[in-house]
Image (tube, helix red, strand yellow):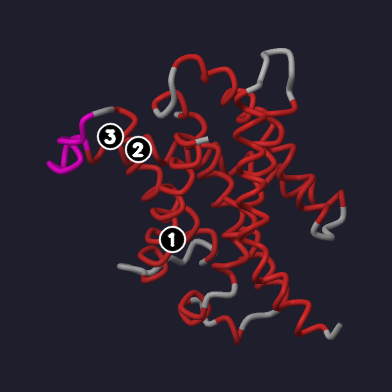
Amino acid sequence: MGTAVRNMILFLVRPFIRFVGYLALKMMKRGWRPDDDQPPRAAASHIAETMAIEPGFSVFHNRTFRDVVKFDALSTTERDRMFNELVTAGMCLTLLCLDFADALVPPEAYHFWRGVRKLAPEEFESHLVGHGIAPSHAAGFRKLIGMRYEEYEELTREVEKVWDVEEPQFQSLPTVAAKRSVARVHAIAIGATDHIRRGKMKPRDPLVDFLRSWLLELNEDIGRFIRDL
């Protein structure tokens, strides 16, 4: 079988495989017991791969993104650094969403999602190794996520404080969780742009708008996964 045919088959069956995997996750969660960490670990593995790594790869290859950052003129090292920031942004958004999972699920599911939150960084690192990244580099990636998470969490709170005074539409949002959801997308878009630009973010930088649109959609996907699993 030729490579092209094999790739086409994989492309066609991937959605089916993912759907079957999602159903398996739902069944595992339904049978979850507090002393069993396998269902939350499986959910953490799924969310790390599909909500952080895969979207990061997708954006990295997006033509609009590459045009905005003038990708063709960049060195390999600089391209790798930008990829790291994209995947890190996706994972930080995932973790910040999981921090507020209790706003989306019934009380009896709280401890399950606490387990997912705890295991997600570990599963993320494991997936990176599975993608061929050296274990030492994957561990360094995880440390970067820890640093960026603290930064983006603080920036999210700053955005909330400013918008609670200056933005009537933000003030009208019904819950703390809804405000946090909007603020974290904006905060990560700004923070990731600043890192990708090496602190030389432009006024009305188009990269902020591009990343905000991507992260807004990703934020909805993560929330839907948490709510519906």
Q: Amino acid at mark 2?
A: Glu
Give the Cα distance between marks 2 and 3: 5 Å
Residue 121 falls left or right of residue 102: right
Q: Amino acid at mark 1?
A: Trp
Classify 76 as above or below 106. below
Task: Look at the magenta stretch and give its main secondary structure.
Answer: helix
Q: Residue at left 63%, top 81%?
A: 74
* Furthest-left residue in this view: 168
Q: In the rendered structure, which segment of residues is drawn in magenta?
A: 164-174
Q: Residue at left 63%, top 30%?
A: 116
Give the Cα distance between marks 1 and 3: 24 Å
Classify 168 as above or below 218. above
Residue 69 rendering spot, x and y as whole percentages: 51, 76
- In terms of sequence position, does the residue under pointer 1 or pointer 3 come before the other? 3
Q: Which residue is mark 1?
A: 214
Q: Nearer the viewer, residue 221 or 147?
A: 221
Using the rendered view, name the quadrant where residue 155 is placed: top left
Q: Amino acid at mark 3?
A: Lys
**Marks 2,1: beta carbons within 8 A:** no
Residue 133 rendering spot, x and y as whole percentages: 82, 58
SS at circle 1 = helix
Q: Nearer the viewer, residue 198 or 16?
A: 16
Q: Which residue is mark 3?
A: 161
Identify the image quadrant of the N terminus: bottom right
